[in-house]
Every structure is written in C-alpha cells, then in structure tokens.
Image (spheres, rainbow, N blue to C red):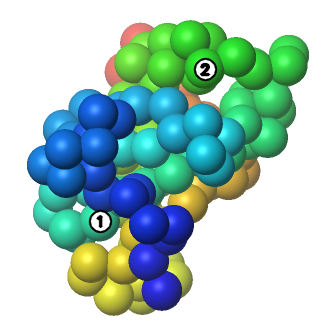
Amino acid sequence: MNSPSGADESPTGSGAANTAAHWRADIASLAFPVPEHGAICAVHRGAFRTLLGAEPVPEACLGYFERHTDAFRAAARAKILRKRIPVGTNLHLTSRDIARKLLEADQIERGERS
C-alpha cells in the first residue's frame, strides 16, 4: 500500500531516493524520507493549513518543516509504531500527529527551564 507512483523519487525524477523534504505538487503535499523505515512520509497541504493558521504555499510548508524537523520525524516514528505500519510502506501525517509532538517538545523544554 505505497503512495502514488514516484513518491520515493527525487523531485527531478531521477529515481534516486531523496534525502530532504520536497514539495509534491501532484499530491499537494510535502514529502520526506523515513530512512530507518525505508519509506516516504507525506504531509498534505490541509495539515499545513491547520499548523500554519493560513492558506499554505509550498515555501511556507518547507520552511515550517525545516524549523520543526525533529517533531515531524518523531511524529512519523510514533505513527509507524502506533499503527504497526510495515517496513517499506509509505505513510502520511495529520496536523494532529505533528501537533502532538510539538506539544511534547514544548513541555519538555519548559520542564528543563523550571
């Protein structure tokens, strides 16, 4: 049950696995690799609409991902474990998946400051 054809290709279509997040216009989503799972994780623009509180454009989505990469990767790992997603199966994150990890990171940071 992998995502649409080409999800694991680089934006140039060379077929080489991409190591960074990139925008997939064909599915209106940001995609990033989850190397330890051998898959690609996608985050639809609708999730970014919720996270950003505004109509998302690809550049804003990529910037948000860059600022919160650890939370996105933690959310992907958590979803893989929670849903028992088989190795090599692509997945997607919702705004809730990501917000949960952002909240956890904020709580940990506040706890370290106390």
Q: Which mark is residue 49?
A: none
Name the N-terminal-most of marks 2 and 1: 1
**Left or right: 95 in relation to 112:** right
Q: Residue at x 58, y 55 (%)?
A: 93
Q: Quadrant of residue 77?
A: bottom left
Q: Residue at x 44, y 66 (%)?
A: 5
For the residue labelled by badge 1, is the local secondary structure a helix, a strand or a loop? Answer: strand
Q: Residue at x 20, y 68 (%)?
A: 38
Q: Are marks 2 and 1 in contact (CB under 8 Å)?
A: no
In the rendered image, residue 28, in percent from the top left (x then y), is placed at 67, 40
Q: Residue at x 14, y 49 (%)?
A: 16
Please state which of residues 46 and 6 is positioned toward the viewer in this rendering.
6
Q: Amino acid at mark 1?
A: Ala
In the rendered image, residue 49, in percent from the top left (x then y), is placed at 81, 29
Q: Amino acid at mark 2?
A: Pro
Please state which of residues 53 and 59 is positioned toward the viewer in this rendering.
59
**Left or right: 61 in relation to 73:** right
Q: Callout 2 environment at 10 Å: few (<14), some (14 to 19), or many (20+)?
A: some
Residue under label 2, please give it: 58
Q: Callout 1 environment at 10 Å: few (<14), some (14 to 19), or many (20+)?
A: many
Q: Quadrant of residue 45?
A: top right
Is residue 9 something that shows in the picture? yes
For the residue labelled by badge 2, is the local secondary structure a helix, a strand or a loop? Answer: helix
Residue under label 1, please give it: 39
Gap between marks 2 and 1, in whole Å?
Answer: 21 Å
In the rendered image, residue 96, in percent from the top left (x then y), is placed at 71, 50
